[in-house]
Image: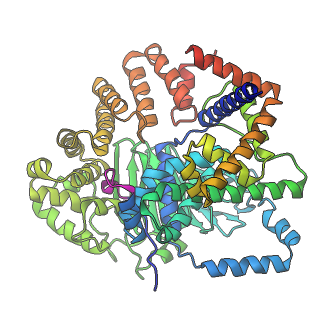
């Protein structure tokens, strides 16, 4: 049976702000162009944010495109339409994983410096924050891509444990076990970085006084 | 021992929490409205190209790659793509990226290594501002440029013409810019482009077979069907860019303001002709606006009766009517449609956006106080809305015009704090230079 490829239409009047995710996903899978547009309107920002925080801002537009192309290609495979958000985050994580592995290979081939550092933030940061950010991502760089993305999903994107399990397609127990390992590892490396610890301690102090 | 472990766990949780906060605060989800529209437009185009790779095909390809040899494949696949190369065929070729065709002489052509050609008609001049692995940015300083952009994955081409910017993926079109008259004409033969500028800040999509004319002095933007060449082929017309005889093939009715201001008797045939030509007869107003068919929407609203449409029309029709009226310079109708959205459908996303558009209309009329009130209304109702950066920037500019630089300084600082890379960041930095 030939599957209908959803076609996205830029139609401002057809926003579906009040439609729930399950309906949107079902209609997008059926090839409804308005639903496809609504999925973009609702989730392109989230996907962009996930990719930026996983990879940095470089080429993020291309990665967002890739995520949605994959989504519209395989939305028919979404078994639980209400899990649309997790489904998209899962695709974004897989795209990010592919990119991280690609960068790793490139770095290995060129014997060059790391390319995984977020070269520029999208929000204004002072010098110490920028430095701390670089150090944080340098630490994440030392983890393999899957571990790094697991950390990002749970701690940076603040997904629930069950959502993390859905996104990565593993059991809850596996998620807990892996998260415990990666938390221990990141924490261990972070606390040996005096500049990072100093910044984070001050950040806590400032938060406490504000 | 137990207490020490607990303290360590607390420290770990706290430190990871703060580190995560740092990452979250550094990378936002936001993007400018123009970039957002361009991204959506790119996706629309990409989705138009069928993906033939099946899951089985992917696995076969992966197996093949493994057989050929990982190392060699990786080297080839992951080697950074070089920037496009180009050569310029011109009487005044100086290798500086300047493409100039002298009046009365032959046209100048820039050939890019991906197969894209940019031809400058005699008397015109353009500069190749930036070249990447996926495209280039051109600045059309004067005259007519014909672009044949080869559609490749990730292709990114753009043409700046005065204050306008034309975002391109794979397409064939002519752009004609008159700096003196402030008139941009874009004739789109194949594909689609997004034209952003003072008259269409969010960008307006143009489809194959359409002509956009933006006149800065008259503050008018109109889209009309492109006159067909004798053989009826849009693509072939671009090859020569020769003028088409209006007598041989008269253009379809245009959708500019004077035409729409004519009597209802003239409106009805125009609606039929355009609707039939684009295959949209009987389709929703929203779809017609999305396809650039503004005339039929306005004509139908008039035939129904504007007061009835405004009082009883559904939200999507009011939105479409407002858009069609704005794009064709029928600002009175646009304003009434937007006000109807706000009064009848308050608290909807469209009603919030209507506040922003009403602000733009008020600003264009010179009613700066009213514009600022509408921008404030939008920012209050949709602080993270898709026009937030635009509304903040417009409010800053309107305040500057109304009350001077000093009054706008605080707004500039707030703008920079929230949108450091926003479309008005340069102006904001002028108003609030860093200490």
Horizontal arrangement in the rendering, residue B174 relative to residue B55 (left or right): left
Residue at the farthest front position: B2
* Left or right for B296, reference B327: left
- Quick one: quadrant of the N terminus of chain B? top right
The magenta stretch spans residue A8: no
| Closer to us: B21 or B172 | B21
**Residue B100 seen by the camera:** no
Residue B30 place in picture, x, y as percent: 52, 41
User: Which residue sits at x=31%, y=72%?
Assistant: B278
Q: Nearer the viewer, residue B410 or A63?
A: A63
Please name the residue shown 64% across and 59% down the image: A94
User: x, y percentage for residue B310?
Assistant: 14, 48
Q: Residue at x 81, y 62 (%)?
A: B79
Q: Is residue B130 above or below residue B113?
A: above
Q: What is the x, y in percent for residue A150?
A: 66, 50
* Above or below, A30 relative to B304: below
Q: Nearer the viewer, residue B430 or B33?
A: B33
Q: Is residue B223 left or right of residue B102?
A: left
**Residue A91 appears in the rendering:** yes
The stretch of residues the image draws in magenta is: A11-21
- Image quadrant containing the C terminus of chain B: top right
Q: Nearer the viewer, residue B6 or B114?
A: B6
Q: Please tell me how many numbered marks the rendered image carries.
A: 0
């Amino acid at each position: 049976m030939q599957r209908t490829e959803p076609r996205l239409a830029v139609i401002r009047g057809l926003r579906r702000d009040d439609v729930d995710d399950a309906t949107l996903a079902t209609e997008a899978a059926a090839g409804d162009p308005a639903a496809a547009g609504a999925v973009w309107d609702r989730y392109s920002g989230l996907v962009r944010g996930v990719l930026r925080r996983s990879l940095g801002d470089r080429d993020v537009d291309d990665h967002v495109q890739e995520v949605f192309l994959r989504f519209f290609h395989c939305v028919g495979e979404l078994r639980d339409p209400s899990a649309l958000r997790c489904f998209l985050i899962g695709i974004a994580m897989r795209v990010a994983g592919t990119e991280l592995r690609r960068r790793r290979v490139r770095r290995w081939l060129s014997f060059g410096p790391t390319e995984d550092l977020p070269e520029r933030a999208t929000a204004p940061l002072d010098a110490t924050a920028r430095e701390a950010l670089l150090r944080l991502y340098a630490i994440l760089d030392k983890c393999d891509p899957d571990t790094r993305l697991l950390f990002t999903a749970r701690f940076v994107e603040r997904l629930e444990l069950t959502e993390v399990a859905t996104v990565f397609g593993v059991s809850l127990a596996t998620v807990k076990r892996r998260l415990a390992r990666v938390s221990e590892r990141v924490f261990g490396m972070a606390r040996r970085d005096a500049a990072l610890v100093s910044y984070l301690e001050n950040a806590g102090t400032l938060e406490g006084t504000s | 021992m137990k207490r020490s472990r607990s303290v360590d766990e607390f420290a770990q949780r706290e430190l990871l929490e703060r580190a995560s906060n740092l990452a979250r605060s550094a990378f936002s989800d936001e993007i400018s409205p123009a970039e957002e529209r361009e991204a959506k437009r790119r996706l629309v185009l990409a989705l138009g190209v069928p993906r033939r790779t099946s899951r089985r095909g992917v696995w076969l390809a992966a197996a093949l790659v493994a057989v050929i040899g990982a190392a060699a494949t990786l080297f080839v696949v992951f080697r950074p793509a070089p920037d496009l190369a180009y050569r310029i065929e011109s009487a005044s070729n100086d290798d500086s990226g300047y493409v100039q065709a002298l009046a009365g002489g032959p046209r100048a052509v820039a050939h890019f290594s991906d197969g894209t050609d940019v031809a400058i008609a005699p008397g015109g001049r353009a500069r190749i501002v930036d070249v990447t692995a996926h495209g280039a940015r051109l600045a059309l300083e004067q005259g007519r440029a014909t672009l044949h952009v080869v559609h490749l994955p990730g292709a990114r081409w753009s043409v700046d013409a005065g204050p306008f910017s034309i975002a391109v993926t794979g397409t064939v079109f002519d752009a004609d810019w008159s700096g003196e008259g402030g008139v941009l004409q874009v004739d789109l033969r194949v594909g689609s482009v997004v034209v952003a500028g003072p008259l269409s800040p969010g960008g307006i999509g143009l489809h194959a077979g359409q002509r956009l004319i933006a006149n800065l002095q008259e503050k008018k933007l109109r889209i009309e069907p492109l006159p067909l060449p004798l053989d009826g082929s849009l693509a072939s017309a671009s090859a020569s860019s020769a003028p088409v005889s209006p007598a041989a093939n008269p253009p379809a009715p245009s959708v500019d303001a004077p035409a729409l201001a004519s009597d209802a008797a003239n409106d009805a045939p125009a609606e039929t002709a355009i609707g039939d030509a684009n295959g949209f007869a009987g389709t929703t107003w929203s779809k017609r606006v999305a396809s650039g068919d503004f005339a039929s929407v306005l004509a139908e609203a008039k035939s129904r009766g504007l007061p009835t449409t405004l009082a009883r029309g559904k939200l999507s029709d009011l939105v479409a009517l407002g858009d069609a009226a704005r794009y064709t310079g029928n600002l009175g109708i646009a304003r009434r449609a937007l006000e109807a959205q706000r009064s009848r459908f308050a608290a909807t996303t469209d009603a919030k956006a209507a506040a922003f558009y009403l602000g733009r209309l008020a600003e264009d009329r010179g009613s700066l106080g009213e514009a600022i009130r509408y921008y404030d209304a939008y920012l209050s109702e949709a602080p993270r809305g898709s026009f937030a950066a635009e509304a903040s920037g417009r409010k800053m500019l309107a305040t500057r015009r109304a009350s001077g630089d000093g009054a706008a300084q605080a707004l500039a600082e707030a703008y920079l704090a929230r949108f450091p890379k926003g479309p008005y960041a340069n102006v904001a930095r002028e108003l609030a230079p860093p200490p």
